[in-house]
Amino acid sequence: MKLVKNPLKLLKILVLVFIIMNVVAFVHAYKFTHFSENNTSKTKSPEKLSSLEKAQTLFLGVNNPKPKNLKFPSQKFETIRLKSNKEIECWLIKNEESKGTVVLFHGYGAEKSSMISKSDEFQKLGFSTMLVDFMGSGNSEGNQTTIGYKEADEVKTAFDYLTQAGEKNIYLFGTSMGAVAIMKCLNDNLIKPKGIIIECPFGSMYKTICARFNKMNAPTFPMAGVLLFWGGIQNGFWGFSHNPTEYAKNINCPTLLLYGEKDKSVSRKEIDEIYTNLKGTKKLNVYQDTGHENYLIKNKTEWVKNISDFLFSTQKTPNHSNF
């Protein structure tokens, strides 16, 4: 009742809450989109945090050391550095009598070495592979990530490099953020890959932030929106327009969409909306008892079959790589 009788005091409290909320969101957004160069330990996934750790993370943001390549391909590979919006490092692994080249793009907080196991499966199927470090990750330039927004330019850079090298059968593969970057690239540019394989892309940037809050058992309103606002401002784009569901409407090439039914980061509704909006030939495969994780761990046999069926269904006649 005292607050009602003293509107000036109430206004001061509201202004203070507003300032604190924006400061917290600003710090959180920056730490989420900028990797640290020091040796701080990475914040655990929300499911593994204690209640105190969750509270600390919500107020102080995540610890995000720059992802490093921890292993290397077992096959002979060539290291390539390409100039995009940032300089990015790639590994090119050529396959004799190659049926084409699959370009692999990693997810948030990962790097190209995390894609080696999947690259190996593509190699067994007779394809060359190119593994890409997005900006801020691995050996690529900078410490910034935009969760697929600016990374879309790097997808095009890798595609253009292979095209200029004479490759005609180019497939784009991405998981999570990598899938989103592929979708935005195809939305923004007139490139024509032979096909794309996308694993668990989120429906919108806002929804993926809300999912993170939900995993922390924290209310999404209003902080999710404030966090997205500052994250976009800090990184030079309007975060509320980063919507793969809309990007899908401009994707006309053959598409294989993969999803784990127990994914707590991306909802089935988001996947269904993306799938509905995709143009051209498309296929959706859902893996049971699987979350937002490497599908090879629990579903290797099924995953390889899905990939193999898709790749060879897009190749009407043998059209070998020019490498």
Image (cartoon, rainbow, N blue to C red):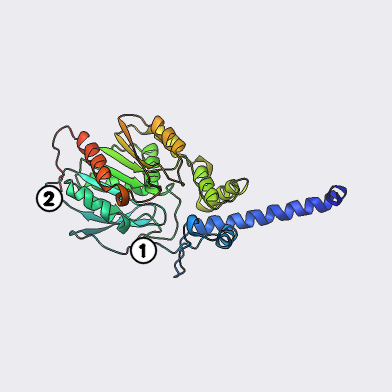
Residue placed furthest toward the left: 97
Specify the amino acid type for callout 2. Answer: Glu
Horizontal side, residue 163 vs residue 1: left or right: left
State how far apart marks 1 and 2 are (Cα).
29 Å
Residue 157, x across and y down, in percent: 32, 48
Residue 233, x across and y down, in percent: 55, 50
Write down the residue under mark 2: 96
Residue 35, x across and y down, in percent: 46, 61
Q: Is residue 282 above or below residue 7?
A: above
Please tell me in which quadrant of the rendered image residue 275 appears: top left
Horizontal side, residue 168 vs residue 141: left or right: left
Please tell me in which quadrant of the rendered image residue 173 appears: top left
Horizontal side, residue 17 vs residue 184: left or right: right
The residue at the point 48 percent across, 59 percent down is 48
Q: Is residue 76 above or below residue 253?
A: below
Instruction: Give whichever of discs 1 and 2 has the lower sequence position.
Output: 1
Residue 75, x across and y down, in percent: 18, 59
Write down the residue under mark 1: 68
The residue at the point 33 percent across, 31 percent down is 252
